[in-house]
Amino acid sequence: MPLNLTRKELYDLVWAKPRTEIAKQFEISSVRLGKLCREMNVPAPPRGYWANLAGRRRKRKYIKPPLTYNVAERIEEDHAAVWASCPNFDPKQFDQDIPPPPLMPYNLEETLERYRLLAYQAPMPKATRGAHPITQKLIAEDERRAKLAWQLSWEKPKFESPEGKELLQGLNQLLWMWTDLGFKPGSIGHRDINLRIGRGGYGRSFEVTRTPPAPTGRRHAKSRSTGFEFWFDTQAWERRSKKPALTFRTFNRAVLRSIALLTIEGWEKEFREAVKRHYDWMVSDRKRAIEQAELARERDRQRKAAELQALLDSRQKLLQNAISDAARSDQIRSLVQSLDERIGPHGKDVPAFEHWRSWALSEAEALDPRVASLAHLNNWFEKFRLDH
């Protein structure tokens, strides 16, 4: 089954044809399809719906339930629609213009207002609601600490005091609120339990702590606080230089909604930054592709220029060598002629002259390209590579 199906697409699909046909089409089991519908909170036709529709059973009135959305599902689908509007773009296809950035249907303020109204429609969890699974994990760890407290001074329970119980109850409401809005609270670790919230690739760690007490003394008596601090993605050692995302006196509807809006706002801002980053990457990829193409063309131009210069230098050297050899050949012949005139009829008195004269003329003959064989001249002409 394609994992990129939206809830709306899956909803339309399961109400358009029987589950067995869909399962066969996507080569999965009907059980897997039903599980996917439950995971994506998509209402599927009940048993007997298609048989009743085909007239094989006595007519019953089936009501098609609407596709409802919680806040996280609505945000996720809106984000999927924006990503779907991103065009396929090959940065190396220079004849393809850079597409405009993905269109956001609303600005940030309008979008947050839409989600705020949707979040406010969801009822806030009551304090009497049962323990959230993560709360149960916190309670179990606190009980373990309580058993060891008399042996190990550092193993002290966190939620045993009245203030701790108030914090635990508030955390429980907070976890249920996020669950009802469609977010997925999670926890990491078994002893030092770190809490997280996430959905659709978005995730942040969080913590709720008691407000640190003010210094004792009459001068600070009025400033002492017994409230709470809500932190996002902050380590304990960072808190001296940072401010909490929210401070409040007690957990109530307004506080829970404020935390919900902080979560939604963080997700929306991170999404918009991701979209902008993706578009900037496309533009940067095109810029890099153009730079690489220009660099490749420049390297090719330099290579061809170097090859041409090497060819011209080779031709020049061939000509210079031929001219030098012809001139040297003429010089040798001129020398032989001068010596012939100088020695004249006295050649018998210089018996080695005839041997030297024969050697010198053969050297002149070998050097002179003007009297070379046709095969030698053809090889010499080919070295000029005049067809290039």
Image (tube, rainbow, N blue to C red):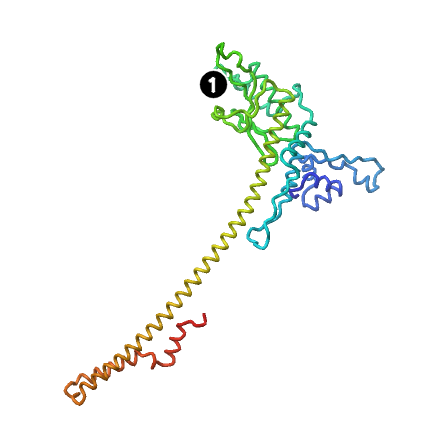
**Farthest bottom residue?**
345
**Farthest right residue?**
58
In the rendered image, the vertical position of residue 247 relative to residue 84, given as above or below = above
Callout 1: few (<14), some (14-19), or many (20+) C-alpha neighbours within 10 Å?
Answer: few
**Farthest top residue?**
218
Q: Which residue is mark 1?
A: 154
Q: Quadrant of residue 230?
A: top right
Q: Position of residue 52 (x, y in %)?
A: 82, 39
Toward the viewer: 276 or 199?
276
Q: Position of residue 93 (x, y in %)?
A: 57, 54
Q: Position of residue 12 (x, y in %)?
A: 73, 41
Question: Which residue corresponds to the image point at 61% horizontal and 26% vertical from the top-left?
Answer: 259
Secondary element type, mark 1: loop
**Farthest left residue?**
349
In the rendered image, the vertical position of residue 118 relative to residue 95, given as above or below = above
Pick the quarter of the image with the N terminus: top right
Amino acid type at mark 1: Trp
Question: Which residue corresponds to the image point at 68% horizontal and 27% vertical from the top-left?
Answer: 120
Question: Which residue corresponds to the image point at 31% horizontal and 78% vertical from the top-left?
Answer: 326
Residue 309 falls left or right of residue 114: left
